[in-house]
Amino acid sequence: MYDEMATKYNVEYTAGGATQNSIRVAQWMLQIPGASSYIGCIGKDKFGEEMKKNSKLAGVNVHYYEDESAPTGTCVSVLWVVKGQFYNMVVTEFCCTSGITMFCDECIHRSLIANLSAANCYKSDHLNSLENWPLVEKAKYFYIAGFFLTVSPDSIQTVAEHAAANNKLFMMNLSAPFICEFFKDAHDKFLPYMDYVFGNETEARTFSKVHGWKTENVEEIALKISQWRKVSRTYKRITVITQGADPVVVAEDGKVKLFPVILLPKEKLVDTDGAGDAFVGGFLSQLVQEKPIEDCVRAGCYAANVIIQRSGCTYPEKPDFS
């Protein structure tokens, strides 16, 4: 299917996968090449080469594990309407998962079809290698998507313990309802290490359900997550939950704050794919500069607002944020 789509339509290559989307957006907001490093897995194929090229152009210092047998991951993202017809199609390849995005005149629904392939093949030996471990030692902030719980929990454990032992910030994302539901034990194992927890309202409610909290109130859930026991007492945990067009929920130190998002006219909405990733990227771009939480959320909302007006998780050459 991927070859057929790439043959019939114009192709744009974008370095994707949830974490990589966030890091690319953070790099774009920072405008400092090499400020971040990314480790993941690709295959030794043409898509892997595109991934390396695209990521480096984005300013990310990438250190991929290249699997000998599995192809670079792919994903199809299809947007369609109940009434109307497609008027344009852009094929966009993502990795560690990759994607094809189709656009219509009034997009309402979206389907994702993923072939994770090499994205599922990361080995912790790559993280612990003489080439890559110095990146961990040098870093002050770590961000990992919840999807990685299905791939290499050993790598997460290694980074989480390093962060806790060295008073560094460790952050993860709930990522998807199925991660919260079917990988509950893994989530619970690493949550005590998390200094920041990101997610959206659907993921938060699923997290609440599987833990028997009997509440769907996002503010209450965010507060409960923030008060979960912690390994390191250097930082108090902060929970950040997005709610689409509704305010962002931030729970910290026993209190909950709501931050309005940037509302967008319906006619300007192009594609919501990657909006949550972009929010985290914008947020991180200010966090690493030690800006207050208000600025972090504002930057996250700005980045998400930019991304949803474009195809895929892409952005203009320069940000317009101050």
Image: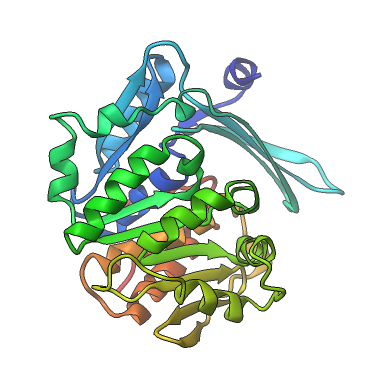
Q: Residue at x 45, y 41 (%)?
A: 148
Q: Relative to residue 131, is residue 1 drawn left or right?
A: right
Q: Relative to residue 70, is residue 201 drawn left or right?
A: right
Looking at the picture, tell me which residue is in the foreground, 6 or 237: 237
Q: Relative to residue 251, is residue 242 drawn left or right?
A: right
Looking at the picture, tell me which residue is in the foreground, 244 or 139: 139
Looking at the picture, tell me which residue is in the foreground, 285 or 118: 118
The spot of residue 174 in percent (x, y) is 52, 56
The spot of residue 96 in percent (x, y) is 44, 33
Looking at the picture, tell me which residue is in the foreground, 92 or 71: 71
Q: Residue at x 39, y 25 (%)?
A: 42
Q: Residue at x 34, y 39 (%)?
A: 155
The spot of residue 235 in percent (x, y) is 28, 73
The residue lying furthest to the right in this view is 83
Which quadrant of the figure contains the C terminus? Answer: bottom left
Residue 173 in the image: above or below residue 297: above
Q: Residue at x 25, y 76 (%)?
A: 291
Q: Is residue 261 visible?
A: no
The spot of residue 301 in percent (x, y) is 46, 70
The residue lying furthest to the top in this view is 69
Residue 117 in the image: above or below residue 208: above
Quarter-of-image position of residue 65: top left
Residue 257 in the image: above or below residue 4: below
Which quadrant of the figure contains the N terminus? Answer: top right
Quarter-of-image position of residue 67: top left
Q: Relative to residue 102, is residue 173 drawn left or right?
A: left
Report the number of numbered marks: 0
Q: How is the image coloured?
A: rainbow
Q: Is residue 146 visible?
A: yes
